[in-house]
Image (cartoon, coloured by chain):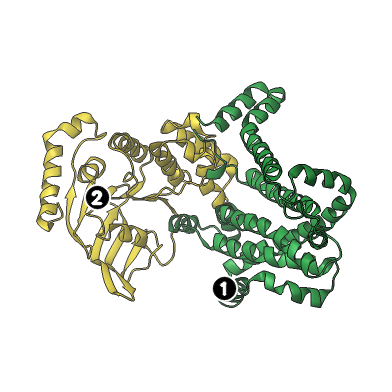
Chain colours: A green, B yellow
C-alpha cells in the first residue's frame, strides 16, 4: 500500500488530532526538498561571491520582502484581482459555449473552426492590442487573462462533450432517453475529466497572462513591480514579487484541484492507490 | 408450440468507406421465438455483432427488414436490454446506481424499481456490494452488474454481445450459470452473440452458425439437453457430440 492510502486509513481511524501529524508525515519530504534548495542557494551565493545585483541570496530576498511587505501585498492584490476575475469569466463563458458547440453541427462547422484558429494565434500576442483598445486600467489586463484562459477551457470542453464511447451512446439510445436527460446523466459526467484538463491548463496560463499584460502597459501589479525592480537592479525585490506570483498561481491551481476532488471523486486520479 | 417474436427477412449489411465496400452480413433470414435462448455463433469478424446491432435498431440494414413483435425496426429499440462487449458501467455511480441508471434514463418510478434492482443484484450475489464503484469490483462482478442493468426494466428481449469475452475461464463458467438462471427465472428472449462453441451449446436452445465474412447463416443446431445444464450435463456424451458437430462445421470453413 502506498503511503497515501496508509494515511487515509489512519485518518479515518483517529480523527482530526492525528490528521495534522499525518499531514506532516506526508509533507515532510517535499518540505525538506524546499529547505534543501534554499540552503544550497544561500551557500552557493556566499561561497562563489555572486554580486547581489546578479542573484541575491534567499536571506536577502526574504529581508527585502519583509521590509516592503505592504507594497508587495498591494501589487499582489492588483494582480490577484485581474487573474481571478479573468479566469472566472473564462470559465463562466467557456464551459456553456463548449456545450453549445458540441451539440450543434452548425456551430461546430462555423464557430469551432474559428475558435481553433484564434486559439492557434499565440494569444499573448494580442496583449498590446488589448492595451490600445481598453487602456492601462484593470479591464485590459483582466481581458488578457480571460483571453489566455478561454481557449484551453473552450477547446477541451468541446472535446470532452463530443467524446462518448459507442457503447454508452448505444446504451443511451436503447433507453429512449431525451437529450436533456442523456446530457445530465451521461454526457456531463463523462466529459468532466476532459473539462478539468482545460481548467488546469487555463489556471497555469492565468498568471502568465496577468504578468505580461502588466509588463506591456501597467502602473500596478506584480508584473509591473518586477519591471520597476529590475530597472533599479533590485533583484531582491523582483524575486520577492516572483515568489508572490508563484503563490498566486499555486492558489488558483489548488482551487481547481479542490473542485476536481469534490466533483469527481470517482476518477482514476483521485482513487487511493493500493 | 412456437411463437414467432423476431423475424429477419433478407437482411444484409454493407459498409461503404473510401477503401471500398465491405459486405459484413450477406442476406440472412432468421426467426427467433418468444422465450428462446438463441446464440449467434461464429468466428470474430463474421458480422454476428452487426446482426445484433441491427436487431437493436442501432444500425440500419442495407437490404431486407427486421420485425419485432410484428413491428418493423426503423429506429433504436427501447423495449430491450443490451449487454455490451465492453462494459458500459459508469465510474461515477456505484453498483446500485449503475443499475438504476437504466430506470432513471427511462424516467420510471425510482422507488418501485429500486426494490427490483436490489433483488436482481442479490440474485447474482452482489447484495453486499451495492455501494461499491465498478472499479472496486472484479470483472465478473462488473459483468453481473451489467446483466442486472439490462434486466431491471423488465424488457421482453435481452441482446448480449459477447458479454463473457473479456473474462477468465473460471469466472466465465460461473457467469454462464448465472446467465442460465436469470434466463430461466425471467422467461425472456435472450439473443446471445459468442465465438465460444461450448458456451453456445451450454446456454442455448438453438445455435445459429454463422460463416465467415460476409456473415450468413449456414446451419442451425437445436440443442436438446436438460436444464439447468450443470456439471453432469456438460460431461455427458450428448453435450460433447454437439460441440464436436459444431466444431467440424467450423473446421470446414478453415477457421479452426
Q: Is residue B73 above or below residue A6?
A: below
Residue B228 x %, y % = 27, 33
Residue that appears at 86% across and 50% down = A73
Q: Is residue A114 left or right of residue B128?
A: right
Question: Residues at marks 1 and 2, common chain?
Answer: no
Check disc 1 and report its element: helix, strand or loop. Answer: helix
Q: Chain of mark 1?
A: A
For the residue labelled by badge 2, is the local secondary structure a helix, a strand or a loop? loop
Sort mark 2 into few (<14), some (14-19) or many (20+) by Cα contacts within 10 Å. many
**Contact flag, marks 1 and 2 (Cβ < 8 Å):** no
| Residue B68 visible somewhere in the drawing | no
Front-most of residues A58 and B182: A58
The front one of A127 and A230 is A230
* Chain of residue at mark 2: B
Residues B250 and A55: in front is: A55
Residue position for label 1: A108
Q: Quadrant of residue A66?
A: top right
- Judge from the rendering whether residue A228 lies leftward or rightward of residue A88; answer left or right: right
B30 or A190: nearer the viewer: A190
Q: Look at the image and tell me whether residue B162 can be seen.
A: yes
Q: Residue at x 31, y 46 (%)?
A: B165
**Percent x, y of residue A248:** 75, 51
Q: Is residue A115 left or right of residue B85?
A: right
Q: Residue furthest top?
A: A14
Image vertical order of residue A157 relative to residue A12, above or below: below
Disc 1/disc 2 C-alpha distance (Å): 41 Å
In percent of width and height, residue A177 lies at 54, 57
| Position of residue A95 measured from the top left corner of the image (x, y, whole percent) | 66, 61
Label 1: few (<14), some or many (≥20) within 10 Å?
some
Q: Which mark is residue B195?
A: 2
Residue B61 occupies which quadrant of the picture?
A: bottom left
Numbered-mark total: 2
Amino acid at each position: 500500500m502506498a503511503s497515501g492510502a496508509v494515511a487515509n486509513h489512519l485518518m479515518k481511524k483517529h480523527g482530526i488530532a492525528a490528521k495534522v501529524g499525518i499531514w506532516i508525515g506526508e509533507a515532510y519530504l517535499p518540505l525538506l526538498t524546499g529547505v534543501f534548495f534554499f540552503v544550497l542557494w544561500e551557500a552557493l551565493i556566499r561561497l562563489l561571491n555572486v554580486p547581489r545585483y546578479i542573484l541575491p541570496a534567499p536571506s536577502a530576498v526574504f529581508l527585502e520582502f519583509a521590509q516592503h511587505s505592504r507594497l508587495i501585498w498591494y501589487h499582489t492584490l492588483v494582480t490577484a484581482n485581474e487573474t481571478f476575475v479573468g479566469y472566472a469569466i473564462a470559465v463562466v463563458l467557456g464551459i456553456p459555449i463548449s456545450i453549445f458547440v458540441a451539440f450543434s453541427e452548425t456551430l461546430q462547422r462555423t464557430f469551432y473552426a474559428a475558435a481553433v484558429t484564434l486559439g492557434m494565434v499565440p494569444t499573448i500576442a494580442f496583449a498590446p492590442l488589448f492595451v490600445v483598445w481598453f487602456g492601462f486600467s484593470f479591464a485590459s489586463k483582466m481581458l488578457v487573462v480571460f483571453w489566455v484562459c478561454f481557449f484551453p477551457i473552450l477547446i477541451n470542453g468541446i472535446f470532452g462533450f463530443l467524446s462518448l464511447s459507442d457503447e454508452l451512446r448505444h446504451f443511451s439510445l436503447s433507453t429512449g432517453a431525451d437529450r436533456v436527460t442523456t446530457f445530465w446523466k451521461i454526457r456531463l459526467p463523462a466529459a468532466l475529466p476532459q473539462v478539468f484538463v482545460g481548467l488546469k491548463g487555463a489556471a497555469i496560463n492565468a498568471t502568465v497572462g496577468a504578468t505580461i499584460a502588466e509588463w506591456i502597459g501597467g502602473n500596478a501589479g506584480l508584473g509591473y513591480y518586477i519591471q520597476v525592480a529590475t530597472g533599479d537592479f533590485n533583484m531582491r525585490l523582483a524575486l520577492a514579487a516572483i515568489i508572490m506570483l508563484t503563490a498566486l498561481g499555486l492558489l488558483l491551481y489548488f482551487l481547481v484541484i479542490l473542485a476536481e476532488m469534490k466533483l469527481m471523486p470517482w476518477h482514476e486520479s483521485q482513487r487511493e492507490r493500493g | 408450440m412456437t411463437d414467432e417474436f423476431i423475424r429477419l427477412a433478407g437482411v444484409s449489411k454493407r459498409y461503404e468507406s473510401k477503401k471500398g465496400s465491405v459486405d459484413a452480413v450477406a442476406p440472412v433470414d432468421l426467426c427467433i421465438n418468444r422465450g428462446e435462448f438463441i446464440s449467434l455463433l461464429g468466428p470474430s469478424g463474421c458480422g454476428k455483432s452487426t446482426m445484433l446491432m441491427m436487431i437493436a435498431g442501432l444500425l440500419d440494414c442495407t437490404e431486407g427488414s427486421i420485425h419485432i413483435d410484428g413491428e418493423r425496426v426503423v429506429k433504436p429499440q427501447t423495449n430491450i436490454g443490451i449487454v455490451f462487449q465492453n462494459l458500459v458501467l459508469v465510474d461515477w455511480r456505484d453498483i446500485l446506481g449503475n443499475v438504476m441508471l437504466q430506470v432513471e434514463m427511462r424516467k420510471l418510478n425510482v422507488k418501485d424499481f429500486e426494490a427490483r434492482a436490489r433483488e436482481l443484484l442479490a440474485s447474482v450475489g452482489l447484495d453486499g456490494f451495492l455501494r461499491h464503484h465498478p472499479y472496486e469490483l472484479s470483472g465478473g462482478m462488473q459483468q453481473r452488474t451489467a446483466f442486472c442493468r439490462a434486466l431491471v426494466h423488465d424488457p421482453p428481449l435481452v441482446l448480449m454481445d459477447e458479454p463473457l469475452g473479456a473474462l477468465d475461464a473460471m469466472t466465465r463458467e460461473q457467469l454462464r450459470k448465472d446467465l442460465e438462471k436469470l434466463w430461466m427465472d425471467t422467461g425472456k428472449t435472450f439473443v446471445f452473440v459468442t465465438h465460444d462453441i461450448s458456451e453456445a451449446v451450454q446456454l442455448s436452445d438453438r445455435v445459429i452458425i454463422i460463416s465467415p465474412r460476409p456473415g450468413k447463416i449456414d446451419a442451425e443446431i437445436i440443442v436438446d439437453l436438460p436444464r439447468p445444464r450443470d456439471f453432469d450435463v456438460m460431461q455427458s456424451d450428448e453435450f460433447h457430440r454437439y460441440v464436436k458437430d459444431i466444431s467440424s462445421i467450423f473446421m470446414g470453413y478453415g477457421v479452426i
